[in-house]
Image (cartoon, grey):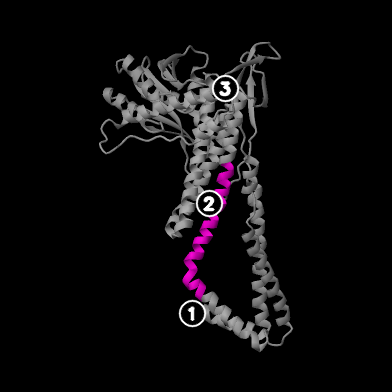
Amino acid sequence: MSKASSSATTKISSFVLLVIFITLALSLVALILAINAWYTPGQEPVAGYLLLIGFLGAALSTYVLLQTRKRIQRLSLKTPSITTTIECRKCGFKSIREFQRGDYIFKEVEPCEKCNENMLITVISREVKEKRVKTRF
Amino acid sequence: MNGLVVMTTLQNHIAQLFPEEFSWILNLLFYVVFIVFMFYGQRIQIYVMLREVEGSLYKLKYIKEEGRKIAIETIKEIGKPETDPTARVDRFLEYFTISPQSLDPAGIVGKLEHVLDVRDTRFKDDVKLMAPAADKTQTNNLENTLEAAMALNYIYKVIRHFYLLGKKTLSLYVIMQIQMILPLVMREAEAYASALKAFAYGQPIGDGAGALVAAKLTHGQPTRKIAKDCISVTVPIEGRTAYVIKAEGPGGNVGKPGDAIKTIIEENEGKIATIIMVDAALKLEGEEVGEVAEGVGAAIGGPGVDQFKIEESILKYRIPINAVIIKEDIGDAVSPMRKEIFDAVDKAIERIKQVILEKTKEGDKVIIAGVGNTIGIGQ
């Protein structure tokens, strides 16, 4: 059920694909016409316009196609890495490991490797590497 | 006007490239495009907006389905049900709560509290039926997981409603209103999506910053149950007696800090020098995650019942109320606690001690309330 719905979610609409490819084809036609115009005396300005239209059309359709693909790749739930820090209150020995189900802050866990005193979970957190948006404010 | 001249010139130039007998086709095409955009411009805009909403709706559907899947899997894993819980989970996701009538607002807080209590009891009973093997902590965590899945289901349905309504009526204004708030709605949905796993695994979340402050102040001291799902610990701080309140962990729980504060005030016949509330608060864009700020007032979110009770209690005895907040955004509040928020907890404790030293005398009694969901935080 979930598999079927997720494949439906990640499908690219055939209408969008059709529009993208028609734009791409028209852009190529514009580029060919631009070459023809270039070799026709007095048609250089037209060649320039067509070249511009052709390049813009090709760039736009390629961009939309790439964006559509990117959106499909983005459709996944990221699971952040959560770490648990265990500390010995007596000798200060610390160990960091991946979070395990059942962990909670101030839970007493296995004895300390050094002094055999029961250790305590003191930190459960995730590290985020955030992209900073450049701003003057 | 200038643009039209350029277009016409360009059209004439392009027409020259084609044989004479086909140039009328280009002319016709030009006028058709012009007329189509003149009369159907708005409709084209509507279709563009609908496409944008549709894209987000696909994503929402995916997130909603994932939420449902995580909830069912967690119930099966923890609760060990004898029958398949899928049908019951689907029914749970459709639950709704009707808020009390506010035409005559007198006494509405009591009515709202009663409705919320009934809702809470109903949810807990249902979770117990779905997951009979779950203990109290796990039941609370499962309830939180299901609530996050429920929120995602609701967001998806509302956006789908406006999308389909817009498609049916082709009204620009119906579609525009949903398209304009879509980025904020998506942010909220993504936040709930990251909350799902945190709730399912019982990891501390950003909203628990206040509860963590209270836990750090009281760890190792004997606790006393003071209100429903709420504990109180008496600790000496800077020569004062501090009654520290927090929700009972480590299960997902916010408790009833309003009732707890009221009880302590009444027990001490109003002889409380100050109340300090600590909570996570939403930051504005541009502010740093984990920034600590100080102010006055009851720092507590939710439907408003607890804030009302606290304000009523302090008004009776004219008790000053201070607030210390730890700033974070909506995504951080419901997803596993960030390192920056964890580090900010120690700064908040320092601020609390400073407030106590500045605003009270030695031998005074103070209340410190650590507000927030205590999931993954013991005491």
**Residue A105 has which mark?**
3
Question: In front here: B190 or B140?
Answer: B140
Q: Nearer the viewer, mark 2 or mark 3?
A: 3
Q: Check contact, mark 3 vs mark 1: CB within 8 A.
A: no
Measured in 3D between alpha carbons, the distance from the residue under mark 2 to the one under mark 3, in whole angstroms, is 39 Å
Query: Which residue is label 1 attached to?
Result: B1
Q: At x 50% / y 63%, what residue is drawn?
A: B45
Does B21 sit above or below residue B240? below
- Left or right: residue B168 versus residue B105 is right
Q: Is residue B333 visible?
A: no
Q: Position of residue B318 (x, y in %)?
A: 28, 25
Q: Which residues are magenta?
A: B35-63
Residues at marks 2 and 3, common chain? yes
Q: Position of residue A57 (x, y in %)?
A: 65, 68
Question: In front here: B86 or B107?
Answer: B86
Tag 1: Cα neighbours inside 10 Å, few (<14), some, or many (≥20)? few
Q: At x 31% / y 24%, what residue is drawn?
A: B313
At label 1, the amino acid type is Met
Mark nearer the N terminus (2 vs 3): 3
**Residue A136 has which mark?**
2
Give the quarter of the image for residue B270: top left
Question: In front here: A36 or B116?
Answer: B116
Q: Nearer the viewer, mark 2 or mark 1?
A: 1
